[in-house]
Amino acid sequence: MGTFVPPGAHSCSTIGAVNRSLRRLIIPAVIVGVALVAVAVIYFVDAEHSLPSFFPGHSSASSPEANHHHTKHGIAALVVALACFAFAWFQSGPKAGAKAGGSATGASS
């Protein structure tokens, strides 16, 4: 008979394949993070009427709140950028199966 594998459990080969595919996302995550930092700076610096027209929160210069800054949009973009950087950082670490360079006891033979 075969071995029982509980629902949601993964074999080691499946986990290794997932790690390799996630490591491919490091560079895109950094690029998206840098772009979101730039978006956050634009939200902090520019007034509502000065935002590019494709940004959420853009309004015409004749709007009563045309000089309003979208601080919450900037904070949200910055938080997502930090999440992208954290993801890239954790994925760029050593592989789970990699061994450390030295021995655990520090003794040499």
Image (cartoon, grey):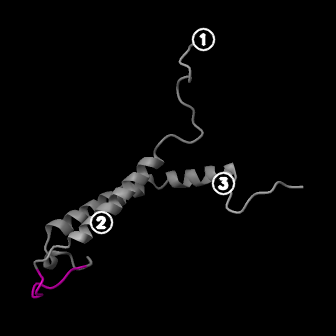
In the rendering, at what x and y percent does residue 90 appear?
Answer: 45, 48
Mark number, residue 47 = none
Q: Residue at x 13, y 77 (%)?
A: 68
Asked if the residue under mark 3 is in contact with the one under mark 1, i.e. CB atoms within 8 Å, the reply is: no
In the rendered image, which quarter is residue 14 located in? Answer: bottom right
Which numbered disc flags the more N-terminal residue, 1 or 3? 3
The span picked out in magenta is 57-66
Q: Dot 2, how many residues are within 10 Å of its Cα: few (below 14), some (14-19), or many (20+)?
A: many
Q: Is residue 109 magenta?
A: no
Nearer to us in this view, 3 or 34 = 3
Q: Amino acid at mark 1?
A: Ser
* Quadrant housing the N terminus: bottom right
Mark number, residue 77 = 2
Q: Is residue 64 magenta?
A: yes
Q: Amino acid at mark 3?
A: Thr
Q: Dot 3, how many residues are within 10 Å of its Cα: few (below 14), some (14-19), or many (20+)?
A: few
Looking at the image, residue 63 sits to the left or right of residue 33; the answer is left
Q: Residue at x 10, y 87 (%)?
A: 64
Looking at the image, residue 35 sits to the left or right of residue 99; the answer is left
Separation (CA) of disc 1 from disc 3: 37 Å
Q: Residue at x 32, y 61 (%)?
A: 79
Q: Amino acid at mark 2?
A: Ala
In the rendering, at what x and y percent does residue 70 appear?
Answer: 20, 73
Q: Residue at x 47, y 42 (%)?
A: 93
Name the residue tied to disc 1.
109
Q: Dot 1, how many residues are within 10 Å of its Cα: few (below 14), some (14-19), or many (20+)?
A: few
In the rendering, at what x and y percent does residue 56 appear?
Answer: 27, 78
